[in-house]
Amino acid sequence: MEPSFDAVMLDLDGTLINTLPAIAAAGNHTLGQLSRRTHPIEAYRQFVGRGQAVLIRQMLGPDHLHLAERATALHREAYARLEPDLAHPYPDIPQLLHELGRRGLKLAVLSNKPHDATRQSIRTFLPDIRFDAVYGHRAAMPLKPDPAAALGIAKELGASPPRWLFLGDSDIDMHTAVAAGMSPVGAAWGFRDREQLDAAGARAIIDQPMQLLTLLVDTPQHQNR
């Protein structure tokens, strides 16, 4: 049977790389510098995914948004320092990516993390993987779940949206895939729970990265839920 998909689009944080300890440590360092209350690491699971500006607002809370500019600068500095020691690829992610590449699928990363930080994360943690496109958030492009960036990558790489699997760990990723006409697959090992992925339109939810290979021919409704 011929494969149904030519390409795989991948979220970064919570899908390829477990950056939650680094994000939380940088966030709490920033809040400490500003004499603000810190948060438990689990709170950051819900803070992340919608871009850096939302992360900063969630960290600060509505009464301290006047500190957002300073907090953003502090967080960027702290995160760049902490990420190499506190983040790591999820188990089997490098093996999955190598196998997808061996099979000739196009590979793209699309993150709401700032573009330069996204590319640096890939260079640091997955230096041996050949990606066809790596994009974080750019000023001229709307954040996910707006499908514009995903559709732009599909056009750039010459694979029509129905030929893409979109693997992500959040409702934001699932909404992006649905809006772009791609097949959304939820990564249950990431920052959000299965219920959120399901409610957001995941056509399949997988518990381990290598299970993605079983979906390359078909992505049936409700698989592994």
Image: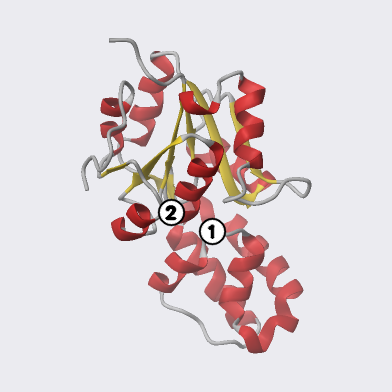
Vertical position of residue 1 compared to residue 222: above or below: above
Please tell me how many numbered marks the rendered image carries. 2
Toward the top, the furthest residue is 1
> Which residue in the structure is indicated by mark 1?
82
Toward the left, the furthest residue is 224
Left or right of 57 on screen, residue 218: left
Q: Position of residue 108 (x, y in %)?
A: 54, 31
Q: Residue at x 52, y 31 (%)?
A: 127
Q: Nearer the viewer, residue 66 or 18?
A: 66
The span from disc 1 to disc 2 (Cα, nearest Å) is: 23 Å
Q: Crowding at label 2, few (<14), some or many (≥20) Cα neighbours within 10 Å? A: many
Q: Position of residue 55 (x, y in %)?
A: 58, 67
Q: Residue at x 64, y 80 (%)?
A: 33
Q: Secondary structure at mark 1?
A: helix
Q: Residue at x 66, y 24 (%)?
A: 156
* Res 11 seen here: no
Q: Secondary structure at mark 2?
A: loop
| Label pair 1/2, CB-CB below 8 angstroms | no
> Which residue in the structure is indicated by mark 2?
170
Residue type beneath disc 1: Leu
Q: Position of residue 12 (x, y in %)?
A: 50, 45
Residue type beneath disc 2: Ser
